[in-house]
Amino acid sequence: MRVVRKDAQRNRERVLAAAREVYAEQGVEAPLDVIARRAGVGNATLYRRFPDRAALVEAVFHETLDRVRQAGEEARRAADPWAGLNAYLEAVFTVLAGDRGANDLMTTGLQGVPSLETLHPHNAETLAGLLGRCRRQGTVRTDVGTEDLLFALAALGRAVPALETAAPGAWRRPLALLVDGLRPEAARDLPAPPLTADQLSGTLREMNRTRSRPVPG
Amino acid sequence: MRVVRKDAQRNRERVLAAAREVYAEQGVEAPLDVIARRAGVGNATLYRRFPDRAALVEAVFHETLDRVRQAGEEARRAADPWAGLNAYLEAVFTVLAGDRGANDLMTTGLQGVPSLETLHPHNAETLAGLLGRCRRQGTVRTDVGTEDLLFALAALGRAVPALETAAPGAWRRPLALLVDGLRPEAARDLPAPPLTADQLSGTLREMNRTRSRPVPG
């Protein structure tokens, strides 16, 4: 009985390690049988433990996503919202840069992953709260809203793994330039209205669809 | 003889129109036989006219890319470099937003397309020249270089087709925020050195590879 539990535990760890590798290489839509092969376990064993992709993705990334959520909680409590905003973005991008699988997960629309479904609204609320406080503090321009920041972060976030491959740590520079564009000192009139929440969701869905397009030929 | 030439001309136009459609839908790596089928011509006819993908892409996008190059020439002659920079970025993004095939072409590393091989260095020189003049003018911070701008434009440019689908014209707003981040008024010390030219090429190549990754499963 003891031996069986140990074996089961070892198999589980092997599957999680293999999944983490494969997700980093191929993204979180990699097929389960590739992961089973990499882990050296049968498909049946893997499916018994993780009935679908979302369950396995949750097991692999639960801790990472929860760390981002915690960074959000901390930033919300920051006495200085501008410092809180910068610390939170640093934490988010450290994850986006450090783990290609987590990046793929956080920037795709994979459904049914509980930690991700918690994190998305949590992230938006963290940013909305901090931006509001920064605007009142005078450190963020009054014409910039949560949708502006979410879109800009999504566009930069998707480029971060490529940047990280070519120049580790270099993401800090474009992120700083992005944040400087939020400051009131340089603000000129913006030439278009902000995205609505629906337009932002539509944009992120479409960014996702475009990226995932298989290139034939 | 006259009839033959007319037929040939009609076939050529049909192929170019079909190619433009297919490139907008599937990107410029779409296979030639999909284009032949869409145009209603045989593969042999298409290959006789356009021996490889690059030749067809050149024929479809030559005018568009040349228009961007001309916008660069105009911007270089602008009396006010800040106005020139903004006008040029507006012209580039109008193309990136208006033609998904052209966007795909301008943000991929497809080799052997003469207009693209002319445009890439021309674009970098246009931006380098304008940035230099803007820095001396005091309208752009002194710590921002051409690689910073090229990277930021690439990251935003790739998100533009998705944005355009959800909210036509909305790209003007994130572009304005990006440009405001270049202004000296809001500049704080940047936390990482600029990319070298090689690191930038590596990043763009990798962004490309990642996007084009077929998603299995």
Image (cartoon, coloured by chain):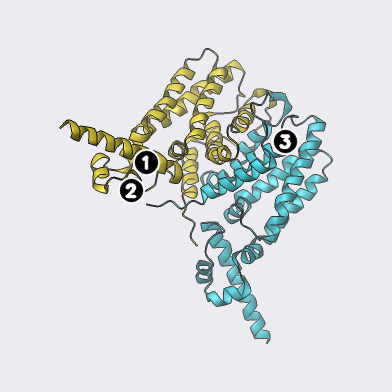
Chain colours: A yellow, B cyan
Front position in the image: A199 or A24: A24
Query: Where does residue B104 sit, x and y in percent of width and height?
Result: 58, 53
Q: Quadrant of residue A186?
A: top right
Q: Are marks 3 and 2 in contact (CB under 8 Å)?
A: no
* Residue pictured at 70% horizontal, 47% vertical: B91
Q: Amino acid at mark 2?
A: Arg
Does the rendering let one see residue B106?
A: yes
Instruction: Give the spatial CA distance, label 3 vs label 2.
Output: 47 Å
Query: Where does residue B42 sit, x and y in percent of width and height?
Result: 53, 76
* Residue pictured at 46% horizontal, 22% vertical: A71
Question: For the residue carrying disc 1, how many other residues have a C-alpha within 10 Å: few (<14), some (14-19), or many (20+)?
Answer: many
Q: Are marks 3 and 1 in contact (CB under 8 Å)?
A: no
Instruction: Give the spatial CA distance, label 2 vs label 1.
Output: 10 Å
- Tag 2 secondary structure: helix
- Which of pointers 3 and 1 indicates the residue nearer the eye? 1
Letter of the chain that mark 1 sits on in the rendering: A
Front position in the image: B151 or A117: B151
- Tag 1 secondary structure: helix
Residue found farthest to the top: A79
Query: Where does residue A86 sit, x and y in percent of width and height?
Result: 56, 23
Q: Amino acid at mark 3?
A: Gly
Question: For the residue carrying disc 3, how many other residues have a C-alpha within 10 Å: few (<14), some (14-19), or many (20+)?
Answer: some
Does the rendering let one see residue B41?
A: no
Question: For the residue carrying disc 2, how many other residues have a C-alpha within 10 Å: few (<14), some (14-19), or many (20+)?
Answer: some
Residue located beneath label 2 in the image? A37
Q: Quadrant of residue B124?
A: top right
Residue located beneath label 3 in the image? B145
Residue located beneath label 1 in the image? A19
Task: Identify the disc placed on residue B207.
Answer: none
- Tag 3 secondary structure: loop
